[in-house]
Amino acid sequence: RRLAEAGGLSGDAALTREIKRMLADPRARRFAIEFGCQWLHLRDFDRNDDKNETLYPEFALLRESMYEEVVRFITDLIQNNGSVLDLINANHTFLNGALASHYGVESITGSRWRRVDGVNQFSRGGLLGMASVLALQSGASRTSPILRGNWVSETLLGERLPRPPLDVPVLPEIVPTGLTAREMIERHSSAPACAQCHERIDPYGFALEQFDAIGRRRPTDVNTSTRLLDGRSIEGFEGLKNYLSLDRRDAFIEQFCRKLLGYALGRSVQLSDRPLLESMSERLSKNDYRFHSVVEMIATSSQFRQIRGRFYGTDE
């Protein structure tokens, strides 16, 4: 309502001031949860109880910290007008002692949360290095390159995959003796009926195989080299981050804009919104991908200003 009043009654300068004031407010945390965590399918991750307690007894003690990391990261981006590209290629995150130890960052101790820079050296930074993402897109007892790859494809890039065949065999939860999770998936995905989807999503997941089912970096190196559907070869976490932030930047930005606009309007994005989405992407590219620039564009759009009955409980 305040945005509508500022934009409709006092002009765009007042709207800009109001946007900055509102986004700097501590209540931006709610925005981070309701938009960011919902888009990323991470909302209420702190209640997740999907892991095999025998194999991963520490998960129950860490899941709240894992969730808090992503909430604080997105809240900081919102409040401090960060770059949307930091969701992919940031070199910082937010840690307390427990999560830092899980990540191998031994210099951070205690319960206090703090921003930690230079985390790329620990294979962290951005969503792909967050334990909440890596754990949620894994099975109870093992990693799942399929789930992780599908999350990158659909959630970050907005790609639509065909439905899998009805008779697809269920993969075992425990990897058979003598195989790695990757080798098991590669055998499964070689079937002609399965290959169409798996050749698109599995390589993304293979690039993240250095992380185990609760997002911990494996102590010994595993094979994370992979060839993507477009023929590009990448290596591991850093290779995937670079690919998404450079080669697939436009697709990621378009997906971000689509999700943010849909959240702001409280409805599905329609074909008639296409010009606005294109303008949002262009505005971001011209403003160093800063978050506030695209929020301002939404707030000044006719779609946002003419939401019937949304703010005032009337169709007037």
Image: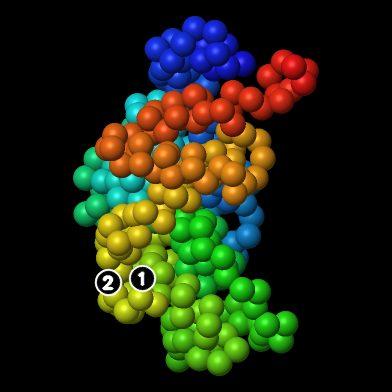
Q: Which residue is mark 1?
A: 207
Disc 1 to disc 2: CB gap under 8 Å? yes
Q: Earlier in the sequence, mark 1 or mark 2?
A: 1
Foreground residue, 274 or 299?
274
Give the answer, above or below, for where 192 lies relative to 151: below
Residue at the image position 39 percent from the left and 77 percent from the top: 229
Give the answer, above or below, for where 279 lies relative to 104: above
Residue 124 visible in this rendered orientation of the protein: no
Residue 28, image x, y percentages: 49, 25
The crowding category of the residue bearing disc 2, from other C-alpha atoms within 10 Å (few below 14, some 14 to 19, many at least 20), is: some
Give the answer, above or below, for where 12 lies relative to 88: above
Residue at the image position 30 percent from the left and 50 percent from the top: 89
Residue 145, image x, y percentages: 47, 72
| Local secondary structure at mark 2 | strand
Snapshot quadrant of residue 95? top left
Give the answer, above or below, for where 110 lies relative to 228: above
Q: Which residue is mark 2?
A: 235
Residue at the image position 68 percent from the left and 82 percent from the top: 165
Report how far apart the C-alphas of labels 1 and 2 lie in the structure.
6 Å
Residue at the image position 56 percent from the left and 28 percent from the top: 302
Relative placement, left or right, of 281 versus 8 is left
Foreground residue, 38 or 8?
8
Q: Amino acid at mark 2?
A: Glu
Relative placement, left or right, of 57 versus 295 is right
Snapshot quadrant of residue 236? bottom left
Residue 22 visible in this rendered orientation of the protein: yes
- Tell me the tag on residue 63: none
Is the C terminus in the top left, top right, bottom left or bottom right quadrant?
top right
